[in-house]
Image: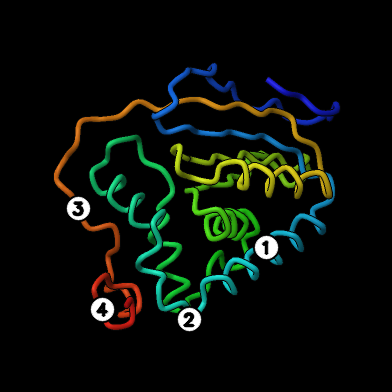
Amino acid sequence: MQTQGHAAGPTPPAIEPVAPGADECRRLRIVAQIDDPHAWDLTAARLLASGRRRWRARPDIADHPALLRWTRIQQSQEIPVQPCLRTTFAAVAAGRAIGDGDPCTGFAAAIMLLSSCPTEAILQSDTPNDPRVVRFSVYAYREDDLPLAEDLITTTIRTCGTVLVRRCTVLRRRPATPATPLLGQPVPELFVLGSTAAR
């Protein structure tokens, strides 16, 4: 466990110990205290705008290797449920808003768009008067850019708060099950594999 600084506030939940396994799915968990909410909100919005610019109107979005790999993994449910990369990319392809002004949702979407690693950011403070404590979870296989995702998170936190906990664990696979649709609505034509827009 790496701890940076000392900060008051609620104690973050216990995080399970590291387990080895190079070819398994790794889950990076970072717990951080946000001391400057305004800087946090601004940085989350800027990163999300950057991620959207990267993929907006890209004709090859459906062929993105990480997206194809994670769609296959998540449809087979080989590992426990994690944030859906496909849903975020589909929203960008369709020009839909992401986050609805929630900096945690927007920041997680930004990390997914920039690093292609499924990511979630959850606000854990109990009351408005408590210091903001946010738990980040990032999922990655060997082929994924976990170092980039971690750098984006920790660099952001250094500008507005303190990293309280950093831990990496390995998730065990579940037996494969028949694939089920990940989206309850049609995906944009740009996002359909084999479509003329994806070529």
N-terminal-most mark, 3 or 4: 3
N-terminal-most mark, 2 or 4: 2
Give residue 94's position: percent from left, percent from top. Answer: 42, 78
In the figure, 165 relative to 144: above or below? above
Give residue 105's position: percent from left, percent from top. Answer: 57, 56
Question: Which residue is tagged 2?
Answer: 57
Question: Which residue is tagged 3?
Answer: 180
> Which callout, 1 or 2, points to the residue nearer the camera?
2
In the figure, 145 relative to 43: above or below? above
- The colour scheme applied to this rendered structure is rainbow
- Cα separation, mark 4 vs mark 1, equals 29 Å
The amino acid beneath tag 3 is Thr
The amino acid beneath tag 1 is Leu
Quick check: 188 left or right of 177? right
Quick check: 141 left or right of 157? left
N-terminal-most mark, 4 or 1: 1
- Cα separation, mark 3 vs mark 4, equals 21 Å
- Cα separation, mark 2 vs mark 4, equals 14 Å
* Numbered circle sitting on residue 47: 1
* Numbered circle sitting on residue 195: 4
N-terminal-most mark, 1 or 2: 1
The amino acid beneath tag 2 is Ala
